[in-house]
Image (tube, helix red, strand yellow):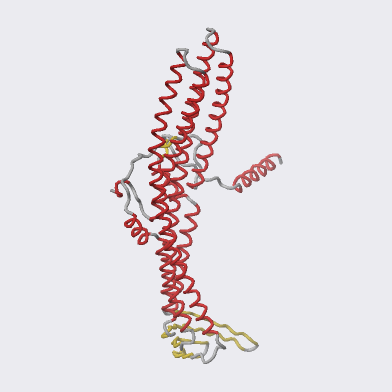
Amino acid sequence: MRRSAASMILFLSLLFVTALPVPPARADLPDGILTLDRCLEIALSANPDLAAEEASLRGAEAVVDQKRAPLRPSLSLSSTHKQSEGSDNTSAELAVSQLVSDGGRSELALRSALLDRDETRDGVVRRRQQLIYDVKAAYYDVLKALWNLDAAEETRELNEKQLRQAQAAYEAGVAPKSDVTAARVDLGQARLDTTKAASALALSRSALGKTLGTDLPPLFSVVEPETTSPPPLDEREILERALSLRPDLGAKAKALRAAELNVAYAARERSAQLSTSGGYGWSDGDDGQWQMSLRLSVPLADGGLASARTAEARAALDKVRAQEASLRQTVIHEVRQALLALREAEENLATTELNLDQAQENLDLAQGRYGVGVGSSLEVSQAAEAFTRARKNRNDALFDYHLALADLERATGSSVTAEEAR
């Protein structure tokens, strides 16, 4: 009895465990390094939103097969068994049927479905491009968090050094105790900033995993991409590239052609339909016989239904045409906006790097002056604060530059690297 109860408990435990939701697979990082290319590879294979778009594409392909079916012959087999008092009869029939003509409506429906499928495929491409941008943004955000943590730790070390110097100067009688107090306050703030930077890094790593669609280990290293400054990009060339390559524009063009086909389809709703069918049937006690039929159906009146549907299709066509024009203007605006942002990011990056160099020189000078007793603790504190701010500004500018380049690639629908820009 005890063995039976133990077996039941074990069975229920296993059932409970198997019923639990399965956590996402953790990405394998044997060397603890996650490159941007590796991130893109993981996202394109694991992101659930992209998987949903690809499932929609498979559904659109299935619709194409559905619309193609009426144009093909159909084969059916039927059998009937009747039993009553004194009677027992079985009959069967094998029949084939084929649509001969319906005014071209089935062909139009198939062409429309093909355009819908191609439109969906363009949507998948655009979703991939958006995902690539999202991955780059999340990856660069991890980089920025790492840079900010390095800056915070360096500032903390500077304040620890300043506290030691202030303590030594106070003990030597050449500096007031207020210098020690001020140095302790600055060190406490630096430690708090370091803790905040570490938390921001952990959060950015988690956000990157969410974007990829997989679970990442809590600790991993990322590789900073090479920063090259491309020459001024030709706006006209970039705009032409965007208008020809943006998959959402291609999808909207296909939607426009599909809407035109829908107008023609609706206009032919009252077309005559001709179909043929034939088969071979047999029953108990009778010889089998061949049958063939030709059916012509001509709608005479529908209460204005066909005209109303045609008007609806024309309105839908006008709507898609307006949407295409609006999207074209949106693409032009996005490209111009991305170009301006990239140029501004380049100039801002160069400026912040100069400011960082200057802040480093001022900090070295202030620390040297305080070390020989001719500077003040306030001067060192202000220089350290300015250096921290300059380094953070440089980190933000570098992040903005990489993001601006990624945004331009998204706006054009293609890669815009420094080499291509040349």
Tell me where residue 177 sits by quadrant. Answer: top right
Tell me where residue 120 sits by quadrant. Answer: bottom left
Residue 272: give x, y in percent of width and height: 46, 89
Q: Residue at x 53, y 17 (%)?
A: 163
* 317 vs 229: above or below: below
Q: Residue at x 44, y 43 (%)?
A: 400
Q: Residue furthest bottom?
A: 300
* 44 sits left or right of 88 in the view: left
* 384 sits left or right of 346 in the view: right
* 280 sits left or right of 301 in the view: left
* 408 vs 351: above or below: below
Residue 165: give x, y in percent of width and height: 50, 14
Residue 418: give x, y in percent of width and height: 32, 46
Q: Looking at the image, which is closer to me, 350 or 18? A: 350
Q: Residue furthest right?
A: 1
Residue 154: give x, y in percent of width and height: 47, 26
Q: Residue furthest left?
A: 422
Q: Looking at the image, which is closer to me, 72 or 251? A: 251
Q: How many numbered callouts?
A: 0
* 207 vs 380: above or below: below
* 240 vs 389: above or below: below
Q: Residue at x 50, y 74 (%)?
A: 316
Quarter of the image for the N terminus: give it: top right
Q: Residue furthest front?
A: 374
